[in-house]
């Protein structure tokens, strides 16, 4: 995975664009960057990372363990305010909630996302690991395909693709040439374009950064997230991540996506499940 200049954790475009500024206790100002839009909305994983960062600052523990988000209305680039509330604090875990608001034309606040998260210290976790699932079988990075290897598959903004380094496994890119597999699978190598290594906050982006599995089901267009729950299992090792996403059921106009994220040390570092509305096309 080509990385011309290695950005550092804490000093990268992702860190700057997910930064929050404390206004008063429990209230943070933020700016949603247009650089993380896809089609016509701000990416849900980017938003989750921003709210995750706000909760990490509000709670006594800073590492997200489990974060569940309900997406209420589509977010747009521009100013936002995040309000947090500490629900419970304990010796090893703390729980809080956060909501992101933007402003309507008449100046009233519109809630975009509501999040409930449990945080702890990933470095204190036990070394006892009993993982039965295996890393996804994928082609080497140099044999996989990125956005520049073909025409844009969907109309609208694709700004987020300039900030990501995604290489999709050839077996899951049939949709790009009009021949979707129908299997509801998406697999690929993932990194940030500036070479910044992954951390718990960027994993919140990773689980929602690949093209939706609905593309391989023969559907194209916006696949808005309704709810997304992410579990961060350990701090990722440096290097590219491998992401595997599957959908087993599309019914009633909705589908689920289950994501597994593996680091360069073959550890399962994040898992997620989301409910999304299927494209109408």
Image (spheres, helix red, strand yellow):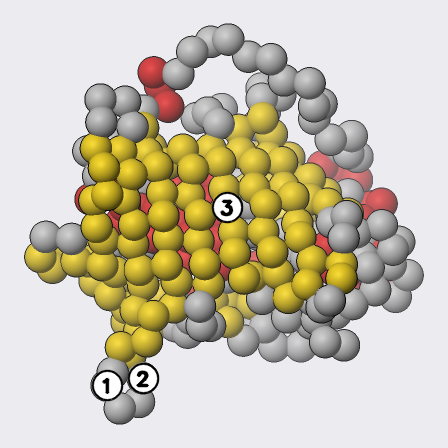
Q: CA distance from mark 2 to mark 3?
A: 27 Å
Check whether the beta carbons of the residues at disc 1 and disc 2 lie within 8 A of each other.
Answer: yes
For residue 164, above or below residue 261: below
Which badge, 1 or 3, is on the more N-terminal residue? Answer: 1
Q: Is residue 166 visible?
A: yes
Kindly state the secondary structure of the residue where label 1 is placed: loop
Number of numbered discs overlaid on the protein picture: 3
Whole-angstrom CA distance, mark 1 to mark 2, is: 5 Å
**Label 2 Cα neighbours within 10 Å, binned few <14 / some 14-19 / many ≥20:** few
Query: Residue 107 has which mark?
Result: 1
- Tell me if residue 164 can be seen: no
- Image quarter of residue 250: bottom right
* In-image side of 139 versus 91 (left or right): right
Point 50% across, 71% down: residue: 41
Write the residue at 15% across / 53% down. Answer: 26
Q: Which residue is mark 3?
A: 229
Which numbered disc covers residue 104? 2
Picture coordinates of residue 160, whole percent (x, y): 53, 61
Quarter of the image where the N terminus is located: top right
Q: Residue at x 47, y 9 (%)?
A: 127
| Coordinates of residue 147 in the picture (x, y in percent) | 68, 58
Look at the picture and state if 227 lies above or below 15: below
């Amino acid at each position: 995975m080509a990385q011309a200049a290695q950005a550092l954790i804490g000093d990268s475009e992702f860190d700057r664009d997910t930064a929050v500024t404390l206004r008063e206790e429990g209230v943070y100002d933020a700016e949603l960057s247009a650089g993380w839009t896809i089609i016509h909305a701000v990416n849900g994983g980017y938003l989750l990372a921003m709210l995750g960062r706000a909760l990490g600052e509000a709670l006594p523990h800073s590492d997200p363990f489990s974060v569940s988000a309900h997406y209420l209305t589509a977010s747009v680039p521009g100013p936002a305010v995040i309000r947090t509330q500490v629900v419970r604090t304990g010796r090893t875990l703390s729980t809080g909630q956060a909501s992101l608001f933007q402003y309507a034309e008449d100046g009233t606040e519109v809630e975009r996302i509501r999040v409930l998260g449990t945080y702890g210290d990933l470095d204190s976790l036990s070394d006892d690991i009993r993982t039965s699932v295996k890393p996804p079988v994928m082609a080497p990075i140099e044999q996989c395909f990125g956005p520049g290897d073909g025409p844009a598959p969907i109309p609208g903004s694709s700004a987020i693709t300039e900030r990501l380094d995604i290489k999709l496994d050839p077996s899951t890119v049939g949709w790009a040439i009009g021949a979707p597999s129908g299997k509801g699978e998406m697999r690929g190598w993932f990194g940030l374009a500036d070479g910044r290594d992954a951390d718990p906050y960027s994993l919140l982006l990773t689980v929602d950064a690949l093209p939706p599995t609905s593309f391989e089901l023969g559907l194209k267009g916006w696949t808005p997230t309704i709810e997304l729950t992410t579990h961060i299992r350990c701090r990722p090792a440096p290097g590219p991540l491998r992401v595997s996403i599957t959908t087993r059921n599309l019914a009633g106009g909705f589908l689920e996506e289950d994501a597994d994220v593996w680091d360069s040390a073959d550890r399962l570092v994040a898992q997620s499940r989301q409910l999304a509305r299927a494209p109408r096309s």
